Image: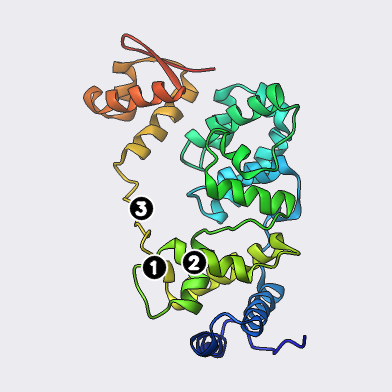
Amino acid sequence: MTHQRINPGTTSSYTKIKELYHKKGLTTHLISIFQRIIYDYYHQHGRTFPWRKTHDPYNILVSEIMLQQTSTQRVQEKYDAFITRYPNFTTLANASLPNILAHWQGLGYNQRALFLKKIAEIITTELNGVLPRDEKKLQNLPGIGPYTAAAICAFAFNQPTILLETNIQSVYIYFFFDSQKNIKDSALHPLIKKTLDIQNPRQWYYALMDYGAMIKKTQGNPSQKSAHYTKQPPFKHSNRQLRGLILRVLLEDTVLTLHQLSNKIKTSPDRLLPVLVQLEREGFIQLDGETITLVS
C-alpha cells in the first residue's frame, strides 16, 4: 500500500485524521495514514534515552519502575549510574537498602526502590534469575501494576500489549476525541488495539510517546479531557516531602531518637509519628520506643 505523506505535527495531520474518522470510522486506510503520521514524526524528532538502547529485561524493569510518576529528564539523570552500580538482579538483591536508597536519591517515591530490591530478591531466589514475560505473572511482583507489566512486555520482549500512559492517551484524545470531554480509558483501548503496529510494538509505543510529548508542548494537554485525569497535589509540605526528608537524614545517621530526628528536620514529633509508622509498615525503618533505625 502506498502511504500518503503528511507533514507530522501540523494542523493538516489533525484535520485529515478527524475528517476521515468522522466520515468512515477507523478504516484500514485511516490506520495507515495515522501510523505514517506518528512514525514520520518519530523518525525525524524521536527522543533518545539510554533505556531505549537496550532490550535487557532487567534494564527495562529498572527504567519502568523509575519512570512511575517521574519525568524522563529526572530519570535520565539517574538511570546510567544506577545500572552501573547495580547491573543485574543479583547485585541489586544482595545490596543493602540504605545503599540502594542512596543511589535512588533525587528520584522521589522511595518505595519504588524498596520494590525493586524485593523484585530482585524474588527473581534470584524463586524464578532462576529470569524476569517473567507474562503480564499477569509480572503483576504478582511488588510495585508492578497493569501499565508497568504491559510496558515491560512491550519494551523488553516486543509483545503487542495494550499500553496506555499519559502521552499515548494525549495522542488518541487529540486525534479522535478532541471535541469530547470526560473520556474513559475504555473508549481508547479499542483504538490502541486496532492501530497497534503488531510487528514492532516496541518502536510504535516509543513513537506514540514522543508524538504525545510534542502535542503537550504545542497544543496543550489533551489528557485533561480524560475522565481519569487528576492533578498531582503540591509536593511542598506534603507527606511525600516529609518521607523523603526522613530517609535522607537516616541515610546519614542510621539510628536516631525521635527528638533528634525532629530537631534535624525541624518538624514536630506529632507531625513525624504517622509518617514514621507508615515507613515502618512499608519496611524502611524499625521503631523501638522513640528509637528509629533504618533497615539495612
Q: How is the image coloured?
A: rainbow
Q: Which of marks 3 and 1 is in front?
A: 1
Name the spot of residue 60 as percent of width and height, x first. 68, 46
Q: Nearer the viewer, residue 79 or 42?
A: 42
- Indicate the amino acid at tag 2: Leu
Q: Residue at x 46, y 22 (%)?
A: 283
- The mark found on residue 183 in the picture is 1
Q: How far apart are marks 2 and 1 (CA)?
A: 8 Å
Tell me if 1 is positioned left or right of 205 in this view: right
Q: Earlier in the sequence, mark 2 or mark 1?
A: 1
Residue under pointer 2: 188
Q: Nearer the viewer, residue 162 or 120?
A: 162
Q: Residue at x 75, y 54 (%)?
A: 53
- Indicate the amino acid at tag 1: Ile
Q: Nearer the viewer, mark 2 or mark 3?
A: 2
Q: Is residue 6 above or below residue 226?
A: below
Assess whether mark 1 and mark 2 are in contact (beta carbons under 8 angstroms).
yes
- The mark found on residue 217 in the picture is none
Residue 195 occupies which quadrant of the picture?
bottom right
Q: Which of marks 2 and 3 is nearer the N terminus?
A: 2
Residue 293 occupies which quadrant of the picture?
top left
